[in-house]
Amino acid sequence: MKELIKVTTNERDEQLVSGRELHEFLEVGTQYTKWFDRMVEYGFAENIDFLTISQKRLTAQGNATTYIDHAMKLDMAKEISMIQRTEKGKQARQYFIQVEKEYKQQLLDTSKLSPELQMFQGIFNAVAKQELETKRLATQMDNITEIVALNTTDWRRDCRNLVNKMAQVQGGYGAYQEIQTAIYEEVDRRAGSSLKTRLTNLRNRMAGEGVSKSKRDKTNKLDVIESDKRLKEIYLSVVKDFAIKYRVWKEK
C-alpha cells in the first residue's frame, strides 16, 4: 500500500499522525493553527485524542523558529478527515482505515501453508466468525450500557462518542454537525434558554477578566454547559434520547 500520510506507533502501540502533514494532504486553505483549533471544537481533548508538540526549524534566512504540531491518534485523524467533506478527506479516511486494518490484523498469506495447516486455518476462521458474531452482540449490549450509564466525569468524551455513532448510523461523519446542532437546539428548548447567548456572555466575562482572545475564541457551548449543573443534566438527557432515537446499539 502506498504511503499517503506517515503513520507512526508510540510505545503504547497507538498509531499517530502529524496534524500538519494531514493538513497539508487535505489541501486545507485555512492556516494550520486556526484550522486545528476549529477541528478541536468537534469535541477532541488534548492528552486524550492528541498531544501538542513544539518543534524548532530554520527559516530561509537561517534563523531558528518554533512551530507547533500535533500528534493525533488515528481515530481522531479519521474523524477529522471525514469532517472535511472533500474527496481528499475521503481518501485520507480510507487510507487510515486500511493502515489500521493491516496493523491490527497483520494479514497472513495462507497460500504458503501446508495442506494440513490450511485445513486448521479454515477451522480457525470458522470459529473466529462465530466469535465475531458473539462480539457483535456484546458490542450492541455495550452500546446500550453506554447510553444508560452516561453520567461519568468524562462526559464530553462519552457524549462525543455517542454523537459519532449517531452520525455513523446516518451514513457518515458528515452528519455530525447537524446532529450536534439539533442536540443544542433541544437543550435550549428544554432549558428555556439560549446557549448562543450564554456563550456570548461567557466570552464577554472572560474578556473583562483579561483572558486572551485566542482562549476566548476556543470557548464553546460545551464550556457553557459544563459551568451549569442543570444544563449538564439536560444535555446528558438529550444526548441519551437522541442515541435511542438513532438506535446506536445497532451500529456495526
Image (tube, rainbow, N blue to C red):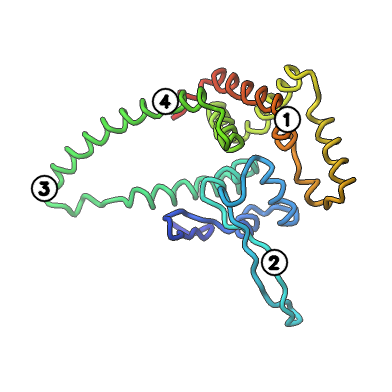
First-in-chain label (1 vs 3): 3
Pair 1/4: label in front: 1
First-in-chain label (2 vs 4): 2
User: Is residue 91 visible to the viewer in this orientation of the structure?
Assistant: no
Give me the disc on residue 83: none
Query: How would you rate the neighbour count of disc 4 (Cα within 10 Å): few for under 14, some for 14-19, many for 20 or more?
Result: some
Query: How far is the residue under mark 1 from the one under mark 3?
Result: 66 Å
Query: How far is the residue under mark 1 from the one under mark 2?
Result: 36 Å
Which residue bears the numbered disc 2? 67
Q: Pick the residue in front: 47 or 92.
A: 47
| Mark 4, secondary structure of its residue | helix
First-in-chain label (1 vs 4): 4
Name the residue: 68% across, 63% down: 68
Name the residue: 18% across, 43% down: 121
Q: Which amino acid does label 1 sit on?
A: Asp
Which residue bears the numbered disc 1? 228
Asked whether the beta carbons under mark 1 and mark 4 sit within 8 Å of each other, the answer is no
The image shows residue 141, relative to residue 27, as above or below, that is above
* Residue 10 image position (x, y, % from top left): 46, 60
Give me the disc on residue 140: 4
Asked whether the beta carbons under mark 2 and mark 3 sit within 8 Å of each other, the answer is no
